[in-house]
Structures are given as C-alpha cells and as structure tokens.
C-alpha cells in the first residue's frame, strides 16, 4: 500500500482547556477542550483512519494486524502519541515516570515528551524543572508547599521547543498552545494543582506525591539539545531532537514554500501534523490535500513523497525498532 493514512482527531475536555482548537477547523464538542489527540494508538483516545483501503480502522489495530505499514516493528504497542494542547489555564505541575517505573506500577510505557510552541501570549511561561539540590531538599520543599522557591519558571514564546524527559517537573501555563510529541502513555503524576476545585465533583483533583517523589530527577538538569537547521531553496527544515539524545523519537519542523521531496529509510514511518497553511502531498502520482489541522501517517510502505504549497508541519519518527 502506497497511500497516506489520514486520521480523525479525538478531543478531551480538561479543567484548564479552552476553545482555541477551533482555529484548526475542528468541530469541537462542548466544554473546555484542552487536548486534541491527533495521532494515537492509545486506548484512551484511538485514532481512526479516514481514507483509503483502511478507512474506519484504528491505528492500534493496524499496528497489530498490518505491521508492514510500520516497518514490521518489534514493539507490542504503537509507540508514539501526537497531541495539540490548548492551555487556557495552568496545567497541573506534574512529572512522568520512565519505562521501568511505569511498566511496574502502571503497566504501560513511560512518558518522555516534547513541545513545539504553536502560540504563546505575551508574558507566557512554563514550569520546567525545579531548584532542589538533593532528594532531601526536594521532599522538604514539597512537604512545606514551598512552590515559589521549588519550581523553575521559564519564559516562552511562539516557535520555542522544549524536550521533557521522564522525571522532569513541568507544566504548560495560561496562554500557550503546543504540539506535543510523546511516548504512547497516559500516566501523569500531579505534584501540585493550585488547590483547584472541579465543578463536576466540588473537590480538588487527586495528587500523586509519593509517585512524584519517586520519579523526579534530582537535581534538575536541562537537556543539551543539538538543534539542526538547514535551508533548501525556499524551504526550511529543522531537526529538534533525534536519537541518541532522544531515544524514543525524532521531531522535525518542515516549512514548505516550494516542492520538497522526502525519502524513507528502510523500515521508517512518519507522523505528520499540519499546523498552518495548505498544500498537496503527492505519492506515486496521486495527490492528497493538506490543510491546517490535518494529521496523518506516511507508512513505511511509501518510499518517497513530495510536499508542495505554503505549509508549516511538525513531523516525527519513532526511535525504536
């Protein structure tokens, strides 16, 4: 099969969400919609194929039954998850476990993730890392609720990129929209949630202090990234992370202004999210429309493809065999 798999997004309401995802052309359900699960094989939000011979099938089923689409991988689950997040309010301050801890305690993958900042209002900031020098100091600051001194606030602007390995204390805050590439996991340990009360229950959300203390990396250290940028004619290409720095995924930005030809390495498949613009994807002489808000997988069975138009795309590939 030499055709792309266009996918139907799944939306999740969140206490911190808003309505900005409508700017991607989505017909949102009612409520505060915080997450668009755009490319997913996770049971909490399965992506369904909208076109071609696999129309109506789910990504996780294709992973099990049509492994040639993904280069005949060894892993049991589709390893990546692409989301778009709309933070109208602050997310909880949280941490994710690594594979070993998650498999033991949650029976799923750990969660290393990254963010491309699609939009950030002036004055926006992230929680990214902490200031505790050792485990004892970390536990003491958490117990006393010394959040102002513990949590690192990092200014953020549109176009920034952040790599968030498991064990990193983090949170998106008010006024940020981000595309998130992550391992396929829905395990989040809330460390602090601003004492917010849910309207539906009248209670605060559950915190996971022990699990957070178990999994937070101490001391925090910003990852050393090797971001590579190149230009080909009018097109611009950025590689944000890739193995071995990021063992689970590679993430790219493609800024397309004229025809660009791409080739797959043997066994690779590519996740594609159009964050702005419009254009055409051409595979084996067949054209497919690309628009802002489209998400798709280019399977490993596609050796070469061309993209043309005026497009801003975030793409990713699995780092695992």
Image (spheres, helix red, strand yellow):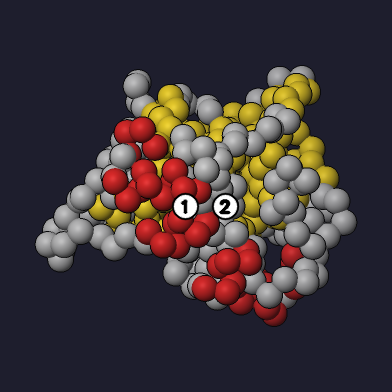
Is 158 placed above or below 240 here?
A: above
Q: Which residue is found at the position 72% from the left and 51% from the top? A: 247
Give the percent coordinates (x, y) of residue 87: 34, 41
| Residue 24 locus on image (x, y percent) | 41, 42
Q: Which residue in the protein does label 1 denote?
A: 95
Residue neighbourhood size for the residue with mark 2, other residues' Cα within 10 Å, grouped as few (<14), some (14–19), many (≥20): some
* Residue 184 pos. (x, y %): 57, 62
Label 1 environment density (alpha carbons within 10 Å; few <14, some 14–19, many ≥20): many
How many numbered tags mark residues here? 2
At 36% across and 43% down in the image, what residue appears?
141
Q: Quadrant of the N terminus?
A: bottom right
Residue 115: tell me if it is visible: no
Q: Residue at x 69, y 79 (%)?
A: 65
Q: Earlier in the sequence, mark 1 or mark 2?
A: 1
Q: Secondary structure at mark 2?
A: loop
Q: Is residue 60 above or below residue 321?
A: below
Q: What residue do we see at 36% from left, 33% from top?
A: 149
Image coordinates for residue 318, horizontal then vertical, percent: 71, 55
In whole angstroms, how far apart are the C-alphas of marks 1 and 2?
7 Å
In the rendered image, which quarter contains the C terminus? bottom right
Q: In the image, 199: left or right of 27? A: left
CB under 8 Å between discs 1 and 2: yes
Judging depth in this view, the residue of 275 and 286 nearest the camera is 275
Query: Which disc is residue 166 wearing?
Result: 2
User: Can residue 73 be seen from the camera position used here?
Assistant: yes
Side of 74 where 35 appears, left or right: left
Which quadrant of the figure has residue 71? bottom right
């Amino acid at each position: 099969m030499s055709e792309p798999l266009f996918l139907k997004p799944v939306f999740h309401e969140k206490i911190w969400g808003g309505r900005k995802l409508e700017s991607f052309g989505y017909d949102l359900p009612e409520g505060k919609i915080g997450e668009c699960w755009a490319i997913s094989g996770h049971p909490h939000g399965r992506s369904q194929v909208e076109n071609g011979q696999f129309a109506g099938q789910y990504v996780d089923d294709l992973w099990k039954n049509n492994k040639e689409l993904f280069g005949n991988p060894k892993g049991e689950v589709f390893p990546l998850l692409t989301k778009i997040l709309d933070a109208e309010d602050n997310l909880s301050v949280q941490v994710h476990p690594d594979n070993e801890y998650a498999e033991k305690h949650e029976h799923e993958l750990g969660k290393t993730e990254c963010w491309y900042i699609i939009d950030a209002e002036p004055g926006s900031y992230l929680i990214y890392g902490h200031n505790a020098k050792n485990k004892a100091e970390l536990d003491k600051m958490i117990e006393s609720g010394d959040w102002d001194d513990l949590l690192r606030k990092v200014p953020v602007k549109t176009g920034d990129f952040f790599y968030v390995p498991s064990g990193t204390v983090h949170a998106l805050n008010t006024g940020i929209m981000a595309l998130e590439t992550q391992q396929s996991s829905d395990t989040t340990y809330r460390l602090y949630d601003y004492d917010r009360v849910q309207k539906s229950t009248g209670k605060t959300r559950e915190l996971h202090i022990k699990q957070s203390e178990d999994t937070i990396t101490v001391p925090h250290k910003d990852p050393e990234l090797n971001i590579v940028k190149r230009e080909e004619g009018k097109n611009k290409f950025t590689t944000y992370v890739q193995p071995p720095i990021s063992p689970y995924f590679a993430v790219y930005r493609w800024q397309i202004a004229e025809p660009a030809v791409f080739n797959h390495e043997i066994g690779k498949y590519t996740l594609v999210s159009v964050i702005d613009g419009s254009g055409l994807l051409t595979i084996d002489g067949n054209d497919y429309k690309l628009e802002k808000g489209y998400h798709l997988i280019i399977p490993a069975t596609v050796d070469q493809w061309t993209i043309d138009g005026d497009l801003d795309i975030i793409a990713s590939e699995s780092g695992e065999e």
